[in-house]
Image: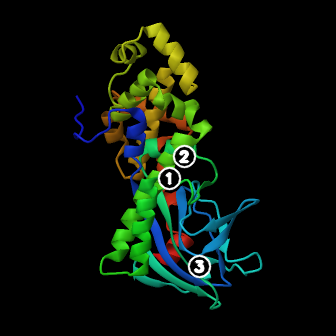
Amino acid sequence: MTLHPPWTPTDAVGEALHVLRMSGTFYCRSELSAPWGFTLPAMPGCLWFHVVTAGGCLLEVGDGVRELREGDLVLVPRGEGHVLRSDPRASTPSILAIPHDMPDSRYAVLRHGGGGAPATMVCGAVRFDHPAARTLVGLLPDLIHVPVSPLTDRLRDTLRLIALEVEELRPGGEAVITRLADVLVIQAIRTWMGTAATARTGWLGALADPQIGRALALVHRDPARDWSVAALAAEVAMSRSAFAARFTALVGEPAMAYVTRWRMHVALDRLAGGDTVARIAAELGYRSEAAFSRAFTRVVGEPPGAARRALAARDAPAGWETAVG
């Protein structure tokens, strides 16, 4: 039996949020004065966030332009390149070309602009490592803009704490800002999940279903267990046929196809972390390395060795990470 700490959520939505643990690729506190602007590079596999702690700016991503005001929070969930600037005429050099102060390898202070109206921001690029987190982030819209007016009290309190740290950076302030920023990202995603109509359909909607959501949580917690449709149905007190039909209708694929695909998500994580194929196969409940490799190739489209090489190439430092690291 798999044991979990007492704070592990018992509902599938809570568990999906529980695993939104981030590894910060980069955080930046920006002290800006109009006119100012810069272009942020694409960061595939990362989520960009921006918190406006004073002043305002324009955000341009894709074909859209958003006006951001003091207290606004915006997420770019799939790490698309985008532009921030004080006004439509401000030039936007690559942020990689603008000098930064670097208190540590993953935290920068940017001072930039022409000496006019001030603005301050906290920005960052974070990566989610858990497969459930990456699945959830993949379902988010291209842009999440949380304006100041409808913010919940908890979001507002977190923003206030970040703004106070930015105004008076004390010893350890960088660590406080990055931790608060991580909390803010999770709060923003939770706010979107609670209000967006699209969050009530598909995989996210299935997470909220009392029975299918519980079945998903069981698979996520213990993917190595010898699951069957009958075993999952018994766990959630449904008949086998009713469970199978409801699972497919809500999730969009049969239960056992989901179990196998989820195991391969976990396997990809383990490969990226350096585990051997033999160890991954054993820990995911496969009787042999060959059986695991066949299943992996069928689902992922390439053998584990090739996938490991592709993951290594993806995670190699380049561009922004090299420049700031």
Label 2 – label 3 distance at C-alpha: 31 Å
Residue 27: x, y in percent? 46, 70
Of the 4 image quadrants, the one containing the N terminus is: top left
- The circle drawn on residue 228 is none
Is 300 or 170 nearer to us in this picture?
A: 170
Mark 2 or mark 3, whichever is nearer to me: 2
Q: Is 112 located above or below residue 274 in the figure?
A: below
Rendering quarter of residue 220:
top left
Q: Where does label 1 land, which residue?
A: 188
Secondary structure type for disc 1? helix
Q: Is 203 located above or below residue 133 in the figure?
A: above
100 with respect to 57 (left or right):
left
155 with respect to 85 (left or right):
left
Task: Name the residue type under label 2.
Answer: Trp
Query: Badge 2, how many Cα within 10 Å: few under 14, some, many 20+?
Result: some
Is 319 or 155 nearer to us in this picture?
A: 155
Residue 106 visible here: no
Residue name at image x 58 percent, y 31 percent:
201
Is 263 or 26 nearer to us in this picture?
A: 26
Q: Where does label 3 land, which residue?
A: 96
Q: Where does label 2 land, which residue?
A: 192
Of the 4 image quadrants, the one containing the C terminus is: bottom left
